[in-house]
């Protein structure tokens, strides 16, 4: 029987994927070896913080809908990336890079004081098919009073390395039409739904239709406020000045795989990223760390 005062790490299998379930006195999460994808995260007694589709499938070679997919060593459509990132690729260029359908190795597990830390990584001395660059990438997950993710990229080659990347976080919300994101006011963004036109955010971001925006020049902290769940979620990033905010709304939801027709209501992607002008250029021997800390607070005075 589970002891709620203890921490626990358990290896499980979901369909075709090896996963680890992590429990602490405060919270629980699930992470898959494939893609080092954090699948779900919730604090005990609260609604989920990280959203996972009810239709999710756990199949080799396919991304799982929801959680926090790791997009690396490029984000989105390669042709929309800066020339330096495109020049790194010599073969097929799947959407969101090559790492999310590879099996990462569990490198380390540490437990201390009600906190659990996991490290998963890829060692790539010869790069990947169509991406011939010596590098290593590691995702560190720390679960305690909050959730911390750190994506470390090390250039172990002899030439500069250009990447774009994202922690493609799906956040669970009570109703996306009722939430707001604070901290974006005055930031520039690319409105991808209007021919990638540049815009400037005025006030907080609220949602009334399909949203697909690339924000740049961001502050370190954003707030996701959800009055219906009486919850404020603080998203503190490091090594990043860009983010993607995405919700498919009604029509696009009909075309998505592993996605209920009405699932758009309960999720919102806020993706901590290094994209466009915020991409990373690593000299030989250098390392870059993309970080995200997720901290929630339940409020009773809305």
Image (cartoon, rainbow, N blue to C red):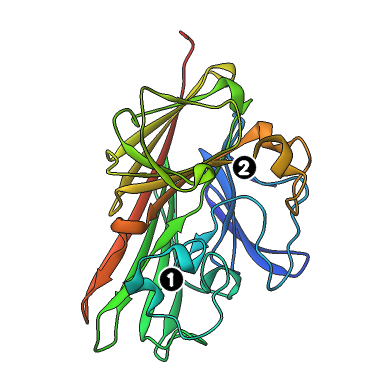
State the image quarter where residue 266 is shown. Answer: top right
Q: Secondary structure at mark 1?
A: loop
Residue on which disc 1 sits: 73
Q: Position of residue 255 (x, y in %)?
A: 75, 50
Q: Above or below — where is 246 with respect to 151?
A: above
Frontmost of labels 1 and 2 is 1
On residue 51, the disc is 2
| Residue at image location 57% in from the left, 49% down from the top | 29
Q: CA distance from mark 1 to mark 2?
A: 24 Å
State the image quarter where residue 289 is shown. Answer: bottom left
> Label 1: few (<14), some or many (≥20) within 10 Å?
many
Q: Position of residue 191 (x, y in %)?
A: 46, 42
On residue 217, the disc is none
Marked residue nearer the N-terminal end (1 or 2): 2
Q: Name the one closer to the observer, 186 or 292.
A: 186
Q: Above or below — where is 53 with respect to 105?
A: above
Q: Is residue 57 left or right of residue 29?
A: right
Q: Is residue 217 left or right of residue 111?
A: left
Q: Position of residue 79 (x, y in %)?
A: 47, 68
> Label 2: few (<14), some or many (≥20) within 10 Å?
many
Q: Name the one closer to the observer, 156 or 21.
A: 156
Q: Name the one closer to the observer, 25 or 224.
A: 224
Q: Secondary structure at mark 2?
A: loop
Q: Position of residue 228 (x, y in %)?
A: 59, 17
């Amino acid at each position: 029987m589970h002891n709620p005062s203890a921490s626990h790490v358990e290896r499980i299998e979901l369909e075709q994927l090896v996963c680890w379930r992590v429990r602490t006195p405060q919270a629980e999460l699930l992470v898959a070896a494939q893609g080092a994808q954090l699948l779900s995260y919730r604090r005990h007694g609260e609604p989920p913080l990280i959203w996972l589709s009810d239709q999710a499938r756990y199949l080799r070679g396919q991304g799982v809908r929801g959680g926090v997919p790791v997009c690396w060593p490029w984000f989105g459509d390669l042709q929309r990336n800066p020339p330096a990132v495109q020049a790194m690729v010599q073969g097929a260029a799947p959407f969101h890079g090559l790492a999310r359908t590879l099996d990462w190795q569990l490198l380390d597990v540490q437990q201390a004081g009600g906190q659990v830390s996991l490290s998963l990584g890829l060692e790539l001395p010869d790069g990947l098919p169509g991406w011939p660059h010596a590098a290593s990438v590691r995702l560190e997950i720390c679960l305690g009073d909050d959730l911390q993710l750190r994506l470390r990229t090390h250039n172990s080659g002899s030439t500069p390395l250009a990447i774009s990347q994202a922690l493609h976080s799906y956040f669970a919300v009570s109703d996306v039409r009722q939430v707001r994101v604070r901290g974006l006011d005055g930031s520039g963004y690319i409105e991808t739904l209007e021919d990638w036109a540049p815009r400037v955010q005025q006030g907080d971001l609220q949602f009334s239709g399909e949203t697909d925006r690339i924000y740049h020049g961001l502050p370190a902290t954003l707030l996701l406020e959800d009055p219906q769940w009486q919850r404020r979620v603080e998203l503190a990033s490091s090594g990043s000045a860009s983010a993607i905010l995405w919700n498919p709304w009604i029509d696009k939801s009909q075309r998505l795989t592993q996605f209920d027709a009405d699932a758009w209501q309960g999720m919102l992607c806020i993706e901590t990223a290094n994209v466009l002008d915020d991409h990373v250029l690593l000299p030989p021997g250098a390392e870059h760390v993309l970080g995200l800390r997720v901290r929630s607070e339940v409020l009773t005075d809305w």
